[in-house]
Each structure stands twice: as C-alpha cells, then as structure tokens.
Image: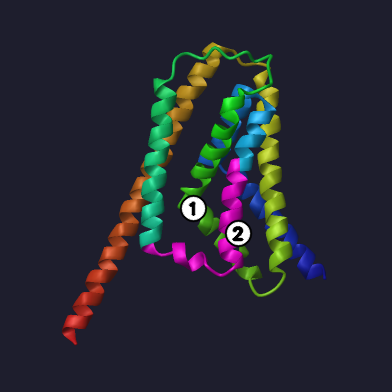
Amino acid sequence: MESLILELATLFIVGLVGALTPGPDILFVLRNTISFGAKAGFFSLLGISCGWLIFISLIYFGFAHLINGALPQGILSFIGGFYLLYISFLLFKKPKNTIDFADNTPPTKAIFDFVFKGFLLNLSNPKAILFFAVIIAPFMNQHLEISLLVLLCGLFLAFLMVIVLGIFFRRFINNALFDRIDKICGIVFIGFAILLLISSYQSFYTFFGEIQSSNLTSAHF
C-alpha cells in the first residue's frame, strides 16, 4: 500500500510539473485569462482537457501505438506547427486591444472559440500523447484507472494555478501592455511552431528512411 501511495504521489507531481512546463497550452490559457477573465481561462482549459481525454482513451483502450509511429508523429507535428503559425498570424494582425479589464465576462461568441482552439491546440501537439504514454506506461498492468485519475488531478491543478495567476496579474495590466503581451505570445508561438515543423521533418525523414532500408533489405534477399 505504501509503495502504491508513493507511486501515485510521484505521478501527481510529475503531471503537475509537466503541465507547468512552458508550452502552447499553458500560454493559451494564461493569455485568455488575462484578456477576458477566469471564465475564459476555464473554457480554454475545457477545450484542452477534451484533448487530454482523447489521448487517455487511446492509452486506456490500447490504441496509443497507432499515433506513436514516425508517420503519425510527423503528420501531427506538421499540422500543429502550421496551426501555431496561424495563431501567431492572428495575434500580429489583430488591431490594438480595447479590453475592459474590469469586466470579467467574455463575449458569448468567443466561448466556443476558446474551447475549440484549446482542443485543437492540445490535439495537434504530438508531445501530449508521448507525455501520457510515457507517464502511464509503468502503471499499464495495474492501477491504470486510479493512475489516470491522479494524473488528471495533477494536470488540472497546474492549469488552475495558471488561471489564478492570470486573474491576479489582470489587475495590473492595461491595453498598451497587453498589446505587447500579444506580440510576445505571437513570437513564442512561432518558436513552438518551428520546433514542431523541425520535429515533423525528422519524423518524416525517419519514416521514409525506414521504408528505403526495408526495400534495400528486400532487394538484397
């Protein structure tokens, strides 16, 4: 029992720290919270958590291997890279902010946008499936359900901390400063996009290299 508690505690901490590591998901939630308040942050988190549930379902039902190969990873990285470039383009293109920081209610039409973009952002990140697969791997044979639950608790706590942080800093931000934050977010998203596109190239290179090697081996025999 003590070993189980220790394993679950370790899993919780790894999930918490892993989620807090800078990335597109955490930046997306933080920006929306600062921009539109807590409700926008929670709806952004809802979209991201829908992506988590898909990854967890693949692991739970034993289908994670279907998107763990070089080709699926390359495709996901390619899509994710261009989606982040698209978000960066929108951030640089948008007019100057005229946000009422005293108003904590996001526009109704933006709520679905928060959920949908959060979902796509998480789903197009191939690192997410690797994170879940690597963390859960030691628990696949036993305690899988409780391990998944503990991992989700760690992830949710990390994002809740980010939302609280965004609510706190929202009181000290004006539109001029937020314009700069948008530009910084755009630059950071471009950086993540470049990394994903490089990862996509490497995955495609590995995939076609394996095919070529297989063909040469077949021809040899």
Vertical position of residue 193 compared to residue 199: above or below: above
**Furthest residue in direction front, as rendered:** 109
Left or right: 157 in relation to 47: right
Q: Position of residue 103 (x, y in %)?
A: 68, 16
Distance Cα–Cα, label 2 vs label 1: 13 Å
* Sequence-earlier tag: 2 or 1: 2
Quadrant of the image for the N terminus? bottom right
Point 38% across, 35% down: residue: 85
Kindly identify which numbered label has been placed on residue 127: 1
Which secondary structure lies at badge 1?
helix
Q: Position of residue 69 (x, y in %)?
A: 41, 65
Residue type at mark 2: give it: Ile
Quadrant of the image for the C terminus? bottom left
- Magenta stretch: give its range: 47-70
Point 71% across, 65% down: residue: 145
Left or right: 188 in relation to 217: right
Residue type at mark 1: give it: Lys
Displayed quadrant of residue 162: top right
Displayed quadrant of residue 173: top right
Point 64% across, 35% down: residue: 43
Displayed quadrant of residue 150: bottom right
